[in-house]
């Protein structure tokens, strides 16, 4: 029997500002727009993170209020974007999920640097007892391990992300 997603706390910028966060940074030898385009490509997420499926559930153009559903194996996460700066930043909260968390956010920022750009990620999950730390750790490990895979994906298929 499939689990039913449960609602989480409505968090956003204030949660990012006050919560102890985890972070990961990766430098890409590509223009910022290519990395941004990879983040907009739903199927690409399954190629660089341990994600099964990504479905954008809002029409373009994306912005604050955009929604998407992410599947990680049997787990389902319904996300709502609360920050969107086209080509530079996207941040979302877990609106509802089957994960044992009460709140979670992820923030993706693309910063131009000489020779390319950096993808700077930060995130935080809250849950009863020690589970928030475990979920935050899993998110962080996924990003740290995944960003080099994203770089390889873009290098292998540059036309896809132009």
Image (tube, rainbow, N blue to C red):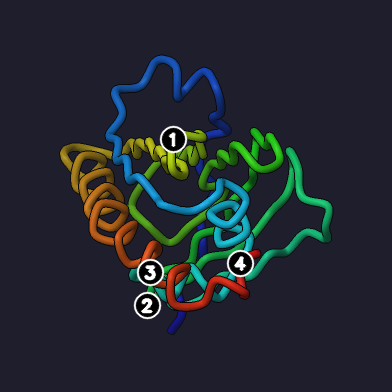
**Nearer-N-terminus badge (3/2):** 3
Do the residues under discs 1 and 4 have CB atoms within 8 angstroms? Answer: no
For the residue pair 106 and 154, the one nearer the viewer reads as: 154
For the residue pair 130 and 25, the one nearer the viewer reads as: 25
- Location of mark 1 (residue): 114
Neighbour tally class for label 3: few under 14, some 14-19, many 20 plus, Cα within 10 Å: some
> Residue placed at 51% from the left, 47% from the top?
94
Real-space Cα distance between discs 2 and 1?
38 Å
- Location of mark 2 (residue): 73
For label 4, the SS is helix
- Location of mark 3 (residue): 48
Real-space Cα distance between discs 4 and 2?
26 Å
Real-space Cα distance between discs 3 and 2?
15 Å
Q: Residue 81 location in percent, x, y?
A: 64, 43
Q: Residue furthest front?
A: 115
Do the residues under discs 3 and 1 have CB atoms within 8 angstroms? Answer: no
For the residue pair 60 and 28, the one nearer the viewer reads as: 28
Do the residues under discs 4 and 2 have CB atoms within 8 angstroms? Answer: no
> Residue placed at 58% from the left, 57% from the top?
34
- Location of mark 4 (residue): 161
Real-space Cα distance between discs 4 and 3?
14 Å
């Amino acid at each position: 029997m499939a689990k039913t997603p449960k609602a989480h706390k409505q968090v956003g910028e204030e949660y990012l500002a006050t919560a102890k966060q985890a972070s990961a940074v990766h430098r890409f030898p590509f223009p910022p727009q290519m990395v941004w385009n990879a983040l907009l490509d739903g199927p690409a997420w399954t190629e660089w993170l341990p994600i099964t499926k990504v479905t954008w559930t809002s029409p373009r153009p994306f912005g604050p209020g955009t929604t998407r559903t992410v599947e990680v194996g049997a787990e389902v996460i319904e996300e709502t974007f609360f920050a969107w700066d086209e080509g530079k930043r996207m941040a979302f909260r877990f609106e509802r999920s089957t994960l044992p968390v009460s709140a979670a956010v992820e923030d993706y920022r693309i910063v131009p640097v000489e020779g390319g750009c950096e993808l700077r990620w930060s995130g935080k999950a809250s849950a009863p007892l020690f589970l928030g730390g475990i979920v935050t750790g899993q998110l962080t490990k996924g990003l740290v391990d995944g960003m080099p895979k994203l770089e390889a994906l873009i290098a292998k298929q540059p036309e896809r992300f132009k």
